[in-house]
Image: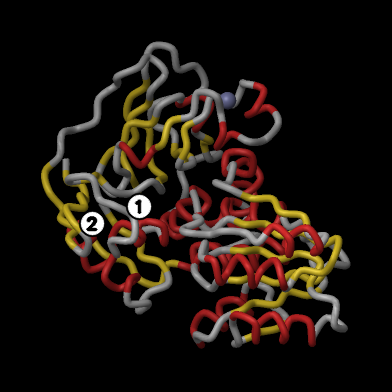
Amino acid sequence: MRGAVLYAPGDVRVEEREDPKIVEPTDAIIRLSATCVCGSDLWPYRGIEAVDGPAPMGHEYAGIVQEVGSQVRTIKPGQFVVGSFFASDNTCPICQAGYQSSCIHRELIGANGAQAESLRVPLADGTLVATPDLPSDDLVPSLLAASDVLGTGWFGAVAAEAGPGKTVAVVGDGAVGLLAVLAASQLGAERIIAMSRHEPRQQLAIEFGATDIVTERGDDGVAEVKERTGGLGAHSVVEAVGTQESMLQAIRSTRPGGHVGYVGVAHGVELPGTELFYSHVHLHGGPAPVRRFLPELIDLIWNRQIDPGKVFDLALPLEQAGAGYQAMDQRQAIKVLLHP
Ligand SMILES: [Zn+2]
């Protein structure tokens, strides 16, 4: 099969890779209908995260089950399925509490590389959620978005306790930040402040339910959020970048007693203890337990109540994965869908 492999920063190649096989009896093999490039793939692409030899890339996937192992009970060949970037058993105490991305048996999908024609998914019964039927083509991008960016933005909004009567601010205008806006809107937030200085992203934020756009960042961004919230700060702030600046911006934009939901993969973030102590802000986040939300998200997409697939503003054949990385790296595209 064909698959994307990162050799070194800036060097993504699509090459012949070994077809995935059933390794454990709980595995499934799926043929990908669509895959995509994640904002987090840009960390190694930019050389900010070390690349350890040629690495298969990609962890977002939706497609049709080809084959299942002998112990797979609920997932069947022919089903269209969506799964998260962590495989999980969905039965252990951590999964039962809704934290499937910390499952005691979790396995990272990234190791297998989902930017490819086929993918091995471990713990298929716990990990995969089937759609009611085969989806029409126009639903596939939104179902793919549920695999990571929608689920992650949704968790950010839930962790920030977005809801009726709340003012929610979102730091970060990548796909996750934009979908956190959509999530906050679905969760009933009264006011949603999207922080973005890029016109096309501002437009999408407004389509997804943002009521305010703030273009300032850092301390100026904090001041602007306070200005718009009677000097108090937002009740709920989603942090969807993962840098020191964005994390502090999120904490400082939150009112005392409010909540920060942080879902940007942290790189070099160090929190000032004294400031945190006096802030009275709740912090909750981490790798999103997307599996917790998948049934609900698939239902919303299936019934055409939400259209998160709008974050894909560029679609390319898998063979052009390298161009997809470049477009996202240079912020020419919000998110790139790849057709295997
Ligand atoms: Zn588990």
The residue to which callout 2 is attached is: 318
Look at the numbered disc 1 and give the secondary structure of its residue.
strand
Residue located farthest toward the top when viewing the structure as drawn: 70
Image location of residue 257, percent across then percent down? 86, 60
Distance between the alpha carbons at the discs numbered 1 and 2? 8 Å
Q: Residue at x 45, y 17 (%)?
A: 72
**In this rendering, is residue 196 above or below 156?**
below
**In this rendering, is residue 338 above or below 3?**
below
| Residue 22, numbered circle | none
Q: Amino acid at mark 1?
A: Thr
Image location of residue 217, percent across then percent down? 59, 82
Q: Amino acid at mark 2?
A: Leu
**Which quadrant would residue 48 be assigned to in this image?**
bottom left
Residue located farthest toward the front when viewing the structure as drawn: 274
Q: Judge: label 1 CB < 8 Å from ligand 1.
A: no
Whether residue 309 is visible here, answered yes or no, is yes
Image location of residue 132, percent across then percent down? 56, 39
**In this rendering, is residue 8 above or below 135?**
below
Horizontal side, residue 159 vs residue 49: left or right: right
Label whose residue precedes the other's in the sequence (1 or 2)? 1
Q: Nearer the viewer, residue 136 or 264?
A: 264
Q: Sort mark 2 into few (<14), some (14-19) or many (20+) by Cα contacts within 10 Å.
A: many
Q: Residue at x 55, y 37 (%)?
A: 101
CB atoms at circles 1 and 2 under 8 Å apart? yes
The residue to which callout 1 is attached is: 35
**Which quadrant would residue 114 be assigned to in this image?**
top left
Horizontal side, residue 281 vs residue 314: left or right: right
Numbered marks: total: 2
Horizontal side, residue 297 vs residue 89: left or right: right
